[in-house]
Amino acid sequence: MATIAQAAAHICCGRSKALDGMRCVFERQVGLISKEKSPNKRREVAVALAPVLHEYQATYLEIGRALRVVDDDVLSARADLIWQEMMEEVNVAAEWPRNGDDFWIRMCEAVPSHTD
């Protein structure tokens, strides 16, 4: 059974090369996180992956909106689920406690803000 994040690479009837490429980067980095011995280094690599997660979600939304296959609220809900699943994969690979630690803060801080 495919995970939600794996299914995200399939939008409608076609595949997005942009999403596939980001998914490959994501999977490679998660593999590197898992192999790292030092907890601090695992966290460092995890935080470096945060912008990729953000870009993946933004690209998913951009492509989905351009295709106009589903309502925006449905598309956004799917994008949020995919992001949550990918964050969970990073969290597990980094062995970084999500509750009671700074995982969410550090991951969110690592995403560039786009203020106008």
Image (cartoon, grey):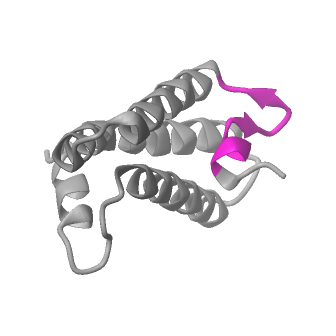
Where residue 107 sits, quadrant-wise, is bottom left
Which residue is rendered at x = 14% and y = 47% of the image?
A: 115
Please state the total of marks drawn on the protein image: 0
Question: What residue occupies the far bottom of the structure in this picture?
Answer: 100
Instruction: Name the residue rendered at 68%, 60% in the picture.
Output: 71
x%, y% of residue 42? 27, 43
Up/down of 56 relative to 85, above or below: above
Is residue 13 among the parts visible in the rendering? yes
Residue nearest the viewer, comparing 95 with 65: 95
- Residue at 66% over, 64% down: 74
State whether residue 109 is above or below residue 27.
below
Q: Is residue 115 left or right of residue 56?
A: left
Q: Nearer the viewer, residue 32 or 7?
A: 32
Residue 35 position, x and y percent, is 40, 35
Is residue 26 a member of the stretch shown in magenta?
no
- Which residue range is magenta in the image? 5-16
Residue 14 drawn in magenta: yes
